[in-house]
Image (spheres, rainbow, N blue to C red):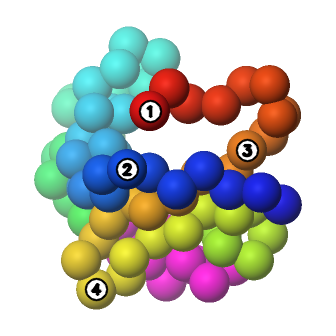
Amino acid sequence: MAKFVLYKPLPIKELLGLALEHPDAHYNPNMHLPKADLVSYYHQKLITKSEMLLDYFSIELDVENGMLLSLPIVHEIIKPFP
């Protein structure tokens, strides 16, 4: 699968934190773990599954620095704007 290499790698923890702030995440501090704990949990989960994510989905992670390096190109016409 073709992949789009990001010009500037993105921090995974920051992306996870932004995802929890989105209204569609339905994050409720009264019902869920604190945001910092959820971010750490899912960050670790992504890091441990980084090899599988690269092999199956062309999602490349920098394990040492916790950065997102590339995303899959799902359709040739639809590509992220540089």
* Separation of residues labelled 2 and 4 (CA atoms): 18 Å
* Separation of residues labelled 1 and 2 (CA atoms): 7 Å
Query: Judging from the image, what secondary structure is the residue with disc 4 in?
Result: loop
Q: Position of residue 67 (x, y in %)?
A: 32, 65
User: Which residue does the numbered mark 2 point to in the structure image?
Assistant: 7
Query: Judging from the image, what secondary structure is the residue with disc 2 in?
Result: strand
Q: Earlier in the sequence, mark 4 or mark 1?
A: 4
| In contact (CB < 8 Å): disc 1 and disc 2 | yes
Q: Nearer the viewer, residue 44 or 77?
A: 77
Query: Judging from the image, what secondary structure is the residue with disc 1 in?
Result: loop
Please tell me whether mark 1 or mark 3 is closer to you in this view.
1
User: Which residue does the numbered mark 3 point to in the structure image?
Assistant: 73
Query: Judging from the image, what secondary structure is the residue with disc 3 in?
Result: loop
Q: Position of residue 40 (x, y in %)?
A: 26, 65
Magenta highlight on residue 44? yes
User: Which residue does the numbered mark 1 point to in the structure image?
Assistant: 82
Q: Earlier in the sequence, mark 3 or mark 2?
A: 2
What residue span does the magenta drawing correspond to? 42-52
> Where the N terminus falls, by quadrant?
bottom right
